[in-house]
Structures are given as structure tokens and as C-alpha cells.
Amino acid sequence: MASLRCFLRSGRNAVSVILRREFHKTSPAALQVTVRDALNQAMDEELERDERVFLLGEEVAQYDGAYKVSRGLWKKYGDKRIIDTPITEMGFAGIAVGAAMAGLRPICEFMTFNFSMQAIDQVINSAAKTYYMSAGLQPVPIVFRGPNGASAGVAAQHSQCFAAWYGHCPGLKVISPWSAEDAKGLLKSAIRDDNPVVVLENELMYGVPFEMSEEAQSKDFTIPIGKAKVERQGSHITLVSHSRMVGHCLDAAAVLAKEGIECEVINLRTIRPMDIDTIEASVMKTNHLITVEGGWPQFGVGAEICARIMEGQAFNYLDAPAIRVTGVDIPMPYAKILEDHSTPQIKDIIFSVKKTLNV
């Protein structure tokens, strides 16, 4: 009987030890979110947050969007807030601008930004200039969004990058996200902004998954417009890029790191207003600069960055001329092999880095 009591007592002690023990808690696995879903989340959260927000464009409602970015929104919010339009960019962009002037907050989707040329008078003359022309009395809180730049196999009329086009115009803010966090945080900031904002997405990035932090999963998460992000720290050379080319820069930096070359990679995030301070600080550290973009070279984003560096204090820190890696100065060909030769590749960035560093 005594031995039985001893056994039971030891058993209770063992249980109490187990209950007191602090097990190692593993952090939850990072959530993988595609750029498409991040954009969808941003619009969903802002539509829920503010009843003045609505989405209009070709096939955005019943078809869930040409690229399924607006999937599920029509079923959730109905015909009044998710609106299918006829194929007339000038018409529905004008309706959206008028709605913004009347106090609503429209999201105007272009199926691709190549089609925004049909509506460029509404974007520039009606949306971008009105706040200035009204002496600050008439804000135009509107978002123009859709895929921008080269896709795959869609040739000359569907492959242009409009970052430089819209970045040229005062009165607009222009953002160009790369990752899922960029897409969600910047689009939410754009929808809340009282100015017209052009959101340049990339069709080839829609299906790409990124890890999304716990902070970014919050409905209150935003990324400030006009602030770049250093995606990779480095000491030998600065690579500045936006949209899909940020990934190319990071891939090139990984290859070069194996050869002892450390690249600092800056994700612009915003084209206008440009965060030149972050670029200058990096150039003053690395003493070398390369810009990378998918658009044409003349009067491009890279050209503007190089000019601003030349005009500022960072110019005195350069040990070699700044170099631009861009798309080729031709309309986009249709044949795949020619298309590949017309857009920047990882090998082009690596070659330019070694040329700049003279290695």
C-alpha cells in the first residue's frame, strides 16, 4: 500500500512538472501572399473602411477583373460600388474624375496602362491640374491603377512603361510597387490620398508570392508615398530600380556577392515624388551608381536619377560615371528571343556592375 501511495505521489509530481514546463514556441510561418491578392486585400479593406470608395473599369465586376485583381469584390459590394464599364477609357476615366470632384474616392482601373493614352487628357488636364487651377479649393482624390510595362508576347502596343510619362507631370503622385507589401501598403495610401495617384502595377508580378509580415496583414497597414526602401545593404555599388526590375537587381546582387561584390539595392516604390535623399545617402556610401528600369532610355526614370545625383552633393562622391540599364530604344518586338533582348536581363546588370567597378 505504501509503495502504491509512493507511485501515485511521483506521478502527480511528474504531471505538475509537465504543466509548469514552458514549451518552446515557434514563431508562426510567414504568410505567403501574391501581389494580386495583396492588391485585392487593399481594395477590399478600403472599400469596407470608406463608403465613398468605389471601383470602375472594364470587366472589374462580374468577370472579377481581366487579371482577377478584383476577385470577389462585386459579389461583396454590389453594382453600385464595383462597376463594369464599356470599352471607352476616355469616357469612364472622365466619369471617375467627375466623381472625385463631387466628393467620392474612385479607383479607376485601366486593363493596361497602354490604354490610358485614350484617357490621358482626363488624367493630366482634368485630374492632375485641377487642385492647382482652383487655388486649392477642388481636390481630386482618385486612383488610376492597372498593369504597366512589358509583359510577355504582347508586342509593341501593349508593352510600354509609363513611369516616365506620368512621373513628368506635376499634380500627380506616381507609385510603382514590387512586392506584395509594397502593393498593399502603397495602394491603401493612394486610395486615402487627396491627390490623384497613378499606381503602376506589373502583370508578370501578379502571381508572384512574397512573405507578408504580421504588421502588413493589419487593416491599418500603409506605406508612405514618396519613401524608397533599401532592400539589400551593400558597400561597393548602388542599384536603384522599381517594379519587377527590383527582383532582377536582387538576383544580380546575389550572384555578385559570391564574387565578393556587395551591391546595395534600392526599391524606389515611388516615382513621383522621388526619394532622392535615400539614393544620395547610398551613393555617398558606395561611391557608384547604376539605375535599372524596363522603360526606354531617353528622358526615363534613370535619366532623372542621374541628373539629380549630378546636381546634388552626392556627385562629388562618385568614383565612376553613373550607368543606366534600360529597355532597348525600340518598340517592343513580338518574337520571344527579340523581346528578351529588348528588356533588361540579370546578366545585363551584372555586366554593368563589373564595368562600373572595373573588375
Image (cartoon, helix red, strand yellow):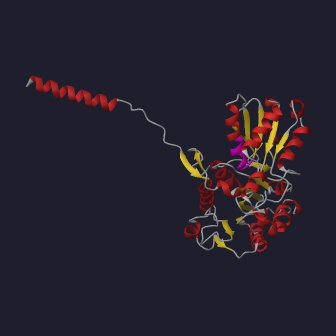
- Residue 209 at x, y = what percent? 59, 50
Q: Position of residue 121 (x, y in %)?
A: 85, 68
Say if residue 232 shows up in the picture: no
The outermost residue toward the bottom is 86
Quadrant location of residue 106?
Answer: bottom right
* Residue 306 in which image quadrant: top right
- Within the magenta stretch, is there residue 248? yes
Identify the image quadrant of the N terminus: top left
Q: Which residues are magenta?
A: 242-249
Q: Main secondary structure of the magenta part?
A: helix
Q: Is residue 70 above or below residue 20?
A: below
Instruction: Spot the residue most to the right.
Output: 311
Q: Quadrant of the C terminus?
A: top right
Q: Residue at 80% of width from left, 57% of height from top?
A: 162
In the rendered view, tell whether residue 95 sits above or below residue 143.
below
The residue closer to the viewer here, 318 or 258, is 258
Q: Residue 211: tell me if it is visible.
A: yes
Give yes or no for residue 88 being in the magenta stretch: no
Q: Nearer the viewer, residue 217 or 181?
A: 181
Q: How many marks?
A: 0
Residue farthest to the left, as pictured: 1
The residue that appears at 38% across and 31% down in the rendered structure is: 22
